[in-house]
């Protein structure tokens, strides 16, 4: 059974760096093909795709946020870390991590999601 | 970047009726299109992938169709638990992209 859970600060000040960790079970980032994506959702608004990292460290980013985002493997094979620099109030959102089966085009959808974590950027 | 446009923004439907949701891509995405359901306070749930394949455990009243740039999600007979927001997601091209969502509400 695959589960994912996001963790990190609930409040960050403007200009600070946000660091979120996705901890998962039921799969490992050493499994060929597997990926973990990050998606966010401002309150009352739509989902926004942010970034994705694959088992072989291949990474993809949203062009509009690429200069501020970094996605890396965590300390264990069951963690992924997202950092976002220079936080602004418009970055206030629920941040989700999600599992994807493979980099093969046909399998890039997100089949399992974490519960999400609300991050507020405010002074 | 591909832009995903969903319509309508809100759909008012009575229980038992059919709901038809649309999603349009600004460029062709083949059949690499997924649909998700999101209820208040919950994470999105995968309903459909490959434009028309139901995910595990998804009832048969949910069906997806389309290819290229035009896609449809149909809920054949709305149940009370189906009132939610639905998002389409293209995963053909990088960056991936979601639509802005369609809220299905009780009429």
Image (cartoon, rainbow, N blue to C red):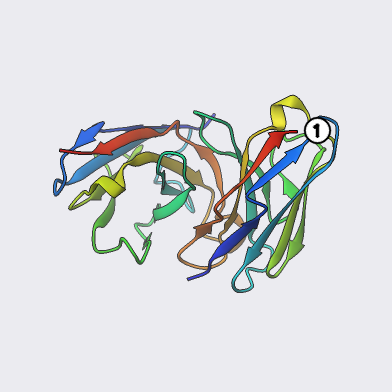
| Disc 1 packing (10 Å; few <14; some 14–19; many ≥20) | some
State the image quarter where residue B26 is shown: bottom right
Q: Position of residue A54 (x, y in %)?
A: 41, 54
| Residue B12 relative to residue A38: left or right | right
| Residue B9 relative to residue A89: left or right | right
Above or below: residue B92 compared with residue B88: below
In which quadrant of the rendered image does the C terminus of chain A lie? top left
- Name the foreground residue: A86 vs A90: A90
Above or below: residue B97 compared with residue A112: below
Name the residue: 57% across, 62% down: B4
Above or below: residue A115 compared with residue A49: above
Name the residue: 27% across, 56% down: A69
In which quadrant of the rendered image does the N terminus of chain A lie? top right
Q: Position of residue B51 (x, y in %)?
A: 71, 56
Q: Residue furthest top?
A: B80
Q: Secondary structure at mark 1?
A: loop
Above or below: residue A23 compared with residue B97: above
| Residue A19 relative to residue B57: left or right | left
- Name the foreground residue: A55 vs A50: A50
State the image quarter where residue A95 is shown: top left
- Name the foreground residue: A30 vs B55: B55
Q: Position of residue B69 (x, y in %)?
A: 68, 69
Chain of the residue where label 1 is placed in the rendered structure = B
Q: Which residue is mark 1?
A: B14
């Amino acid at each position: 059974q695959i589960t994912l859970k996001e963790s990190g600060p609930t409040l960050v000040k403007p200009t600070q760096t946000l660091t979120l960790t996705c901890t998962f079970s039921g799969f490992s980032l050493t499994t060929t093909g597997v990926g973990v994506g990050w998606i966010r959702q401002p309150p009352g608004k739509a989902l926004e795709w942010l970034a994705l990292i694959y088992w072989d460290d291949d990474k993809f980013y949203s062009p509009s946020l690429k200069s501020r985002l970094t996605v890396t493997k965590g300390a264990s094979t069951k963690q992924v870390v997202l950092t976002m620099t220079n936080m602004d109030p418009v970055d206030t959102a629920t941040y989700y991590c999600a599992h994807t089966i493979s980099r093969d085009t046909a399998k890039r959808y997100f089949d399992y999601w974490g519960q999400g974590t609300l991050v507020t950027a405010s002074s | 970047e591909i832009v995903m446009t969903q319509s309508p923004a809100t759909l008012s439907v009575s229980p038992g009726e059919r709901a038809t949701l649309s999603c349009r891509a600004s460029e062709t995405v083949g059949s690499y299109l997924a649909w998700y359901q999101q209820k208040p306070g919950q994470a999105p749930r995968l309903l459909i992938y490959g434009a028309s394949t139901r995910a595990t455990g998804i009832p048969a009243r949910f069906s997806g169709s389309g290819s290229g740039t035009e896609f449809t999600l149909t809920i054949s007979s709305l149940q009370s638990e189906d009132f939610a927001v639905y998002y389409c997601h293209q995963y053909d091209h990088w960056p991936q992209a979601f639509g802005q969502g369609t809220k299905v509400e009780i009429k």
